[in-house]
Image (cartoon, rainbow, N blue to C red):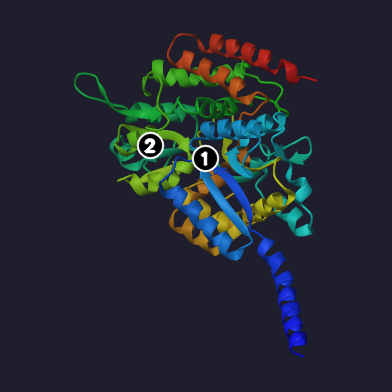
Amino acid sequence: MGNRIIRSIVAAAAAALALAMPAARAQPVEVSFYYPVAVGGPITKIIDGLAADFERENPQIKLKPIYSGSYQESITKALTAVKSGEPPVMSILLSTDMFTLIDEDAIVPFDGLLKTPDDQAWAKSFFPAFMENSQTGGKTWGIPFQRSTIVLYWNKEAFKEAGLDPNKAPANWREQVEFAQKLTKRDASGKVTQWGIQIPSSGFPYWLFQALAIQAGTNLMNATGTETYYDRPEVIAGLTYWVDLVKKYKVHPEGIVEWGTTPKDFFEKKVAMMWTTTGNLTNVKNNAKFDFGVAMLPAGKQRGSPTGGGNFYIFKKSTPAQREAAFKFIKWVTTPQRAAQWGIDTGYVAVRGDAWDTPVMKQYVAGFPAAAVARDQLPYAKAELSTHDNQRVTKALNDGLQAALTGTKTPEQAMKDAQREAERLLRPFKK
């Protein structure tokens, strides 16, 4: 009798242990992802907060954000990790890195993860302008997240002082010059104390310039990433206008203007109008000690801006469980409510139309109408410069722009040289 009881207790314990073992083995799926920002600062706090909220709702998934430096540093680290066999599961990298990541066989398209009607509807919810840099060959390779366009910021106090309507931005290239002439201030010795306009030419010179090319009437490349149009007359006209702001009209600083210090120059009233990303909107809102305005970029032959910013990518060397977990997070973080809040917190454009219909976003735009400018510019926006061998093809353009802006080449010669180099680099990708 006693033995029978002991045997039944042992059997019950063994059964309980057997039931417990699968649960013990079910470790959380770890999803590492590169996020392009230096460690620290408000954005990392937001990302850490989103990761913690997601893990609370999905305890079976462990998110591991890795703050990987600038976009340039992040793509370099990601490709190095691919070659070493240990890439992250997902990354936020520039939308323009798409062809490079495909050519390196580093990522998988999202199409295989879109299994339900709800998934399909979600994939179609993003603004079409942002999807131009996210799809190719009939497949979706990236999902828009922190996306932007270029907008014009102006100091309303400086406009008033110059006798300009503080609530009216320049509508076209001619007005932009006229306003900038009135806004440029010089001291008794002729030294400029306030520039009329500043367009940064370091960091992302091609991006700021691309707006001028689009406004002049053409984009810089084809949709398949195999051709560039750097030497088209419209492109040369766009660069000539930029150089004229410096040399002819003397309303723009000479030489190379730093991307990173342009907002600071604006805050310090060293410049009255600046072109920069809508991603700087929250920065300007928090730091400008004067009334400012935000507008679509002025039109040349037409309005226009390239889109910009980062997409989510899922890396090929990941398990099916990791891909599903990454996809679950990407869907979660791009719901209308979260896309709206991300836009409010950072200044990036909320990436889907229905995010703008949420109560939180409607309330924000009602109190801060400037937040809607980048969204309203999207119908005029074009895909950002992106090709195969993208970094070197873009460098050819950047080198040409800097040569023209520093006066070592004419705009025409600079663009012809850039086009010749781009054609050499792209020859292997022409079918």
Q: Residue at x 57, y 54 (%)?
A: 339
Which three-letter amino acid code belongs to the residue tagged 1? Pro
Which three-letter amino acid code belongs to the residue tagged 2? Pro
Q: Residue at x 74, y 70 (%)?
A: 18
Sequence-first disc among 1 and 2: 1
Residue 272 screen position, x and y as percent = 35, 34
**Dot 1 corresponds to which residue?**
36
Nearer to us in this view, 166 or 21: 21
Q: Is residue 235 left or right of residue 119?
A: left
**Dot 2 corresponds to which residue?**
263
Q: Is residue 114 above or below residue 69?
A: below
Residue 256 screen position, x and y as percent = 41, 21
Q: Give the position of the C terminus as an image quadrant.
A: top right
CA–CA distance in space, label 1 to label 2: 20 Å
Secondary structure at badge 2 equals helix
Name, please, the residue furthest toward the bottom. 1
| Mark 1: few/some/many CA within 10 Å (<14, 14-19, 20+) | many
Q: Is residue 145 above or below residue 84?
A: below
| Mark 2: few/some/many CA within 10 Å (<14, 14-19, 20+) | many
Residue 154 screen position, x and y as percent = 39, 39
Q: Residue at x 58, y 45 (%)?
A: 33
